[in-house]
């Protein structure tokens, strides 16, 4: 059974790496993705979203200047800096404190998606990946993405996929229903 869980874990984590290809043709504003893997006491969470949400954070109006696509490196650097301000995965997801989960590693990345046609040139996805150690993973009864919905006004839904032990999960969350029972 452990080999099946490991194989599913590898497949899901690899899927995050190929997310740029999946989203390249359908870069959708307001749609975020999360991948969750719990094996033993180690919890891995990957949270991916259109990086434009970073630029729009705290703004009421979507500003999109087609002429600003000339300097992709500058835009990517600016978005990377904005992403770094989200220091913890707990800015996106809330875990039950009785699970005693602590972050041991957090990484951030910004990747251009779609750049092969004029319609998608200059669009970027942001990714936050975190590895956590949970002292009492049996107390991890649910996950709430309410912090993500509070942080970004324009999220319509979050698609969550994952493996918890030997159980696969797939759920779509909204602001009115931001929690996932495990």
Image: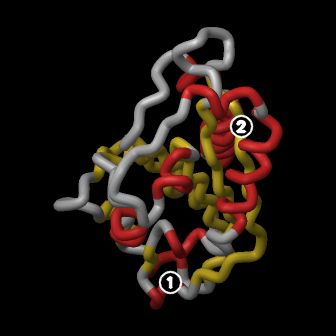
The x and y percentages for residue 103 are 69, 77
The number of numbered discs placed on residues in the rendered structure image is 2
Helix, strand or loop status at disc 2? strand
Q: Percent from the top left, x then y, of residue 162?
A: 49, 47
Q: Position of residue 153 (x, y in %)?
A: 34, 59
In the rendered image, which quarter is residue 4 located in? top right
Residue 111 numbered tag? 2
Residue assigned mark 1:
99
Locate residue 179 relative to residue 47 in the image: left or right.
left
The answer to whether residue 31 is seen in the rendering is yes
Instruction: Estimate the spatial distance between the alpha carbons at disc 2 and disc 1, rounded to whole Å.
Output: 32 Å
In terms of depth relative to the viewer, which is nearer, 11 or 45? 45
Q: Categorize mark 2 by other alpha carbons within 10 Å: few (<14), some (14-19), many (20+).
A: some
Q: Is residue 106 left or right of residue 22?
A: right
Residue at x-position 44% and y-position 49%: 167
Of 167 and 16, which appears nearest the observer? Answer: 16
Check contact, mark 2 vs mark 1: CB within 8 A.
no
Q: Is residue 123 left or right of residue 75?
A: left
What colour scheme does the image use? secondary structure
Report helix, strand or loop for mark 1: helix
Q: Residues within 10 Å of mark 1 (few under 14, many from 20)?
A: some
Q: Residue, x 61% and y 79% (percent of image)? A: 134
Quarter placement of the C terminus:
bottom left
Which residue is rendered at x = 76% and y = 33% of the image? 72
Residue 154 picture location, percent across and down: 34, 51
Q: Quadrant of the N terminus?
A: top right
Q: Is residue 145 above or below residue 120?
A: below
Residue found 76% across the figure and 75% down from its top: 104
- Mark nearest the camera among 2 and 1 is 2
């Amino acid at each position: 059974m452990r080999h099946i869980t490991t194989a599913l874990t590898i497949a899901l984590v690899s899927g995050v790496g190929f997310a740029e290809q999946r989203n390249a043709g359908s870069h959708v504003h307001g749609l975020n993705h999360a991948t969750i893997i719990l094996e033993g006491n180690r919890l891995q969470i990957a949270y991916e979203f259109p990086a434009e949400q970073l630029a729009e954070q705290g703004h009421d109006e979507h500003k999109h200047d087609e002429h600003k696509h000339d300097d992709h490196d500058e835009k990517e650097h600016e978005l990377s800096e904005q992403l770094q301000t989200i220091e913890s995965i707990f800015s996106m997801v809330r875990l039950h404190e009785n699970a005693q989960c602590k972050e041991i590693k957090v990484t951030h990345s910004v990747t251009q998606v779609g750049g092969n046609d004029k319609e998608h040139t200059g669009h970027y996805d942001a990714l936050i990946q975190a590895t956590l150690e949970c002292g009492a993973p049996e107390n991890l009864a649910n996950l709430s993405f309410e912090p993500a919905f509070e942080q970004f006004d324009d999220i319509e839904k979050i698609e969550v996929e994952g493996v918890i032990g030997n159980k696969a999960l797939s759920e779509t969350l909204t602001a009115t229903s931001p929690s996932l029972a495990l």
